[in-house]
Image (tube, rainbow, N blue to C red):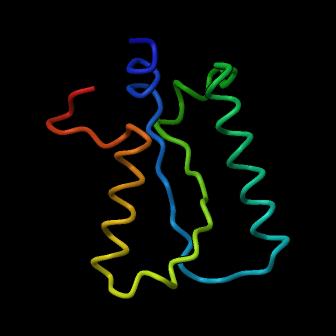
Amino acid sequence: MENASLYRTLLIVIYIILIGGNVQGKKERIEKSLQIIHDVAVKSLGSLCVTEEYKALSVPISTSRFESARQKADLAATLLQDLGVAHHNGEY
């Protein structure tokens, strides 16, 4: 139940990076995302939980093996379901 409460106060949005970038930029985005995940896990976001409804996470994923836009959409949906942030009818 505690996780459900956390999901209510913090909506995590996953961006799937479809375009390339320099390695250093990707590393910095990954490090920032990992820091956000750590802050959520240890509940050290403080007042940010009240002032910000969600935090965005960058997740670089090679999508070259997914040919169509439909396959990429299915990948994103599967990731959200696996992470437990995709709920039907707003139920947690």
Q: Position of residue 19 (x, y in %)?
A: 59, 83
Q: Residue at the spot x=14%, y=36% of the render?
A: 89
Q: Is residue 60 above or below residue 45?
A: below
Along the horizontal axis of the image, is 9 left or right of 21? left
Residue 50, how many percent across, how many down?
52, 24
Question: What is the quadrant of the N terminus in the image?
Answer: top left
Report the residue that reaches farthest toward the front: 65
The picture places residue 3, in percent across and down from the top left corner, at 45, 20
Q: Residue 85 is drawn in which quadrant? A: top left
Which x, y percent locates residue 87?
25, 38
- The answer to whether 22 appears left or right of 10 in the picture is right
Residue 65 vs residue 90, the one in the foreground = 65
Which residue occupies the extreme top position in the image?
1
Q: Is residue 74 above or below residue 65?
A: above
Residue occupying the point 33% across, 86% down: 68
Query: Would you say 78 lies left or right of 18 here?
Result: left
Looking at the picture, does residue 69 appear above or below residue 90?
Answer: below
Q: Nearer the viewer, residue 48 or 57?
A: 57
**Going by the picture, which residue comes out furthest to the right?**
24
**Left or right of residue 77, residue 51 in this image:** right
Q: For the C terminus, which image quadrant?
A: top left
Residue at 52 percent of width and 36 percent of height: 52
